[in-house]
Image (tube, helix red, strand yellow):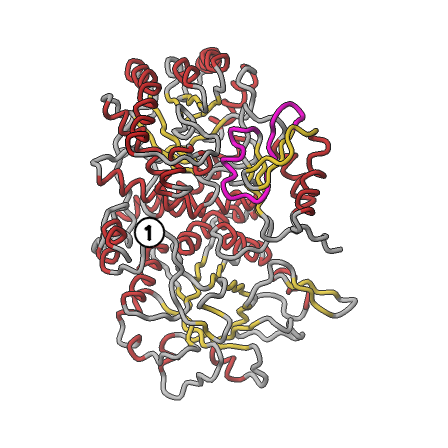
Amino acid sequence: MNADAVKMLQGRYCNSLTDYSRFVTREVAIGDVPMGGNNPIRIQSMTTTDTMDTIGTVEQTIRMVDAGCEYVRITAPSIKEANNLAEIKKQLRQRGYNVPLVADIHFTPNAAEVAARIVEKVRVNPGNYADKKKFDQIEYTDLEYQGELDRIFQKFTPLVNICKEYGTAMRIGTNHGSLSDRIMSRYGDTPQGMVESAMEFIRMCETLGYYSLVVSMKSSNPQVMVQAYRLLVQTMVAEGMNYPLHLGVTEAGDGEDGRIKSAVGIGTLLEDGLGDTVRVSLTEEPEAEAPVAIALVKRYTERSQKSKVESQKPAQDLELQTSNLKYSPYEYKKRDTYEANAFIGGHMVPRVVVDLSQANLKDPAVMNDAGYLYSALLDKYNMAEQSVDFVYLGDSLPSFTLPGNLKQLYHYPTWQKLVNKTLCHPVFALDEYIQAGTDRTSALNLVRIKNADLESEAFGLIPLDRSLVFVLETDELHGMADQRAFFLKLQEMELDVPVIVKRGYSFDTEDLELNTQDLQLFAGTDLGALLVDGFGDGIWIDAPQVPTCVITSTAFGILQATRSRISKTEYISCPSCGRTLFDLMITTQMIRSRTSHLKGLKIGIMGCIVNGPGEMADADYGYVGSGTDKVTLYRGQQAVKKNISSANALDELIGIIKGDGNWIEPAE
């Protein structure tokens, strides 16, 4: 690793890698609901109504507040909408709702200057507030680059002065896909470019003596988003800043995908103690977003309270971070492991384990939940796109033949008794594995282990060979950090053993829908955070109160969201707002219904050009509203068909995919 990377690694981006501790930021007043400092992590969302529809916007805002929103953002694409924010605010106050309002600004400094006199906060995007985005590649000399900054400073200064005069807060909201040509030309489409885009505007604010700032680093790719926020904090700390953070994964999508992708990005940073306000961007009604955000944040409210009483572990802060230069929180690098039995570890994609030890093993249809579709008529299995790699059977023995490529895991004493051990492998406790006379002839030997075992005498007696795989478990309050410490310790010990990360969950309610969502959020956070950092050769989710099919889908969803293993089409779908030019929920489902079989393809579905080609930073194809009943289709970030009828747009999109050779016919 080069000297700059080492220096960066030694910078602080969180209080501790091994214990939960919230990173304390500057308090910023936003109406009567302050953010940052020792205040709770705040919840917010954004209206989807036309801002000129005063009654509709007021009614929707009330529903959002009743659902738990503490801030409500409303788009102001022009002066007309910015002025109407005053009427919206007036009617809300008349009905007893004093929620702080946030004006969302893109491209229009004059609208921002109007809105800043009315609402409690304005959001500006440094990529398009006073900068240019024409997809031009320009080489800037240092003098030319500074000249552009001087020009932006002149256009930005009036807004800052208005905010100072009216006590209005501001969010500097960088988006991965809407970086300016100037930033792209110097830094590229990178987390560093995102950070510098925001820092330029922050430095301008400080030059003008204005500090009521909130900062965000949003991306539809959770991996990029996490790296950017961490790098932002490291950069701010180096410059003596600690502005509060607005967390969000932009264009997360809907349903399971939207929740898991949001959890991977937002949850990973909350685990690090970062984040002062959260917005979950779902392609659903905005009042559906707050409960998801609340569920994510609640874990840390409870954890913070318990940590003060229960956590007696000494803070290791940066000890592991600085002692092991193979790990950097600012860039993705998969942990180096050996390839066990040519199946797990090494360059293999992470494997999925599900527990069928309590299932009905007399009916082969039980395998449907694990992604192996059983046909009773043909007495055979067909693999789905999301077919698990291992099933844990414990001490149970199936009475039917399992799929021919599915590996089975048994408790070691039961495995010993098997007559036919083909595709069957033992799971050991640590003491079982090191006992003399233990049968270790299996091609894969899985050993259950916890972080504390690394310090035990027994661990030093483990026979190390390339059949060994660890199953890492934890019951710690801050389990993700406990497991992260295990991986860092393995690297320090130069042990390249593949590791399956196992997490167990139990819930206090019998509400299946609620348990399903919580599993998606909690596992998305705990396992996704490790995968984003390159840790884990497999995942194992244990949740007895949730159906196996949900566990299977959640596991593959986490791998997809972390870009660790692709098993389905990915939809980069914006959450809608007052700028949206068609019904995003209906359109997204329509596109999904005809393209969901295109494994690995990324399709962006955007309501308008603001959330258009830029926001689809890594989409393969894009479907973007460009006018009433008009759609523009993109290949990557290049428009290939402009302003076509929405009635024909999906057929036209499929035609482009076919013409590129990326179409396959759906299975019967």
Please say if 597 is above or below 539: above
User: Magenta stretch: dominant SS?
Assistant: loop
The residues colored magenta run: 608-630
Q: What residue sits right under mark 1 in the picture? A: 329
Tell whether 8 sits left or right of 404. Answer: left
Res 274 → quadrant: top left
Q: Nearer the viewer, residue 359 or 478?
A: 478
Tell whether 280 sits left or right of 622. Answer: left
Residue 307: % across, % down: 28, 48
Tell whether 664 sits left or right of 386. Answer: right
Q: Residue at x 44, y 65 (%)?
A: 500
Please say if 172 is above or below 617: above
From where the camera sits, is residue 349 visible?
A: yes
From where the camera sits, is residue 294 visible?
A: no
Tell whether 622 sits left or right of 157. Answer: right
Q: Nearer the viewer, residue 224 or 635?
A: 635
Query: Which amino acid, by three-letter code, is at mark 1?
Result: Pro
Q: Quadrant of the C terminus?
A: bottom right
| Residue 619 shown in magenta | yes
Q: Nearer the viewer, residue 481 or 227?
A: 227
